[in-house]
Image: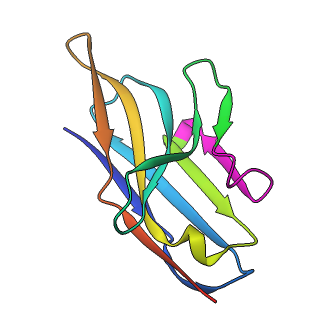
């Protein structure tokens, strides 16, 4: 079994910062792509930032220059440093990872989500 556990969400004023963490645990051989998505009320889930299988980082245009994704491979953990937060950043943030597990199988996993609320 593989689990993704997120932490770090909360309430912050516009212009403030938050740091999200996502730790993967369980029967993990390796992690391919890993990143963060978000879903605001009434909207579709969208990619915020992520690492591709080759280690390249991708960011949504709306967060470029404000958010930074990083990872600690030894801890199977990915972070999202969010700065200059805006009310439009309010959403539930989900961690996602494409993971190799025993049995030569790749699985796509989601965390439970952590809410971020930015007040104006």
65 with respect to 98 (left or right): right
Q: Quadrant of residue 28?
A: top left
Q: Is residue 112 above or below residue 37?
A: below
Residue at 61 percent of width and 56 percent of height: 80
Q: Position of residue 20 (x, y in %)?
A: 55, 63
> Magenta segment range?
60-74
Residue at 44 percent of width and 50 percent of height: 23
Pick the quarter of the image with the C terminus. bottom right
Residue at 34 percent of width and 43 percent of height: 25
Q: Of 3 and 60, which appears nearest the observer?
A: 60
111 with respect to 83 (left or right): left
Q: Position of residue 68 (x, y in %)?
A: 71, 52
Q: Position of residue 95 (x, y in %)?
A: 42, 49
Q: Quadrant of residue 73?
A: top right
Residue found at the very far front of the displayed protein: 42
Q: Is residue 21 above or below residue 24?
A: below
Q: Position of residue 48 (x, y in %)?
A: 56, 49
């Amino acid at each position: 079994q593989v689990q993704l556990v997120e932490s770090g969400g909360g309430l912050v004023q516009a212009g403030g910062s938050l740091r999200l963490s996502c730790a993967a645990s369980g029967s993990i051989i390796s992690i391919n792509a890993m990143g963060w998505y978000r879903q605001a009320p009434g909207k579709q889930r969208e990619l915020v930032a992520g690492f591709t299988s080759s280690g390249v980082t991708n960011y949504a245009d709306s967060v470029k220059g404000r958010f930074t994704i990083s990872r600690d491979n030894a801890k199977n953990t990915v972070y999202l440093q969010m700065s200059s937060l805006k009310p439009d950043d309010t959403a539930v943030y989900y961690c996602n990872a494409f993971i190799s597990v025993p049995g030569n199988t790749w699985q796509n996993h989601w965390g439970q989500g952590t809410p971020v609320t930015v007040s104006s």
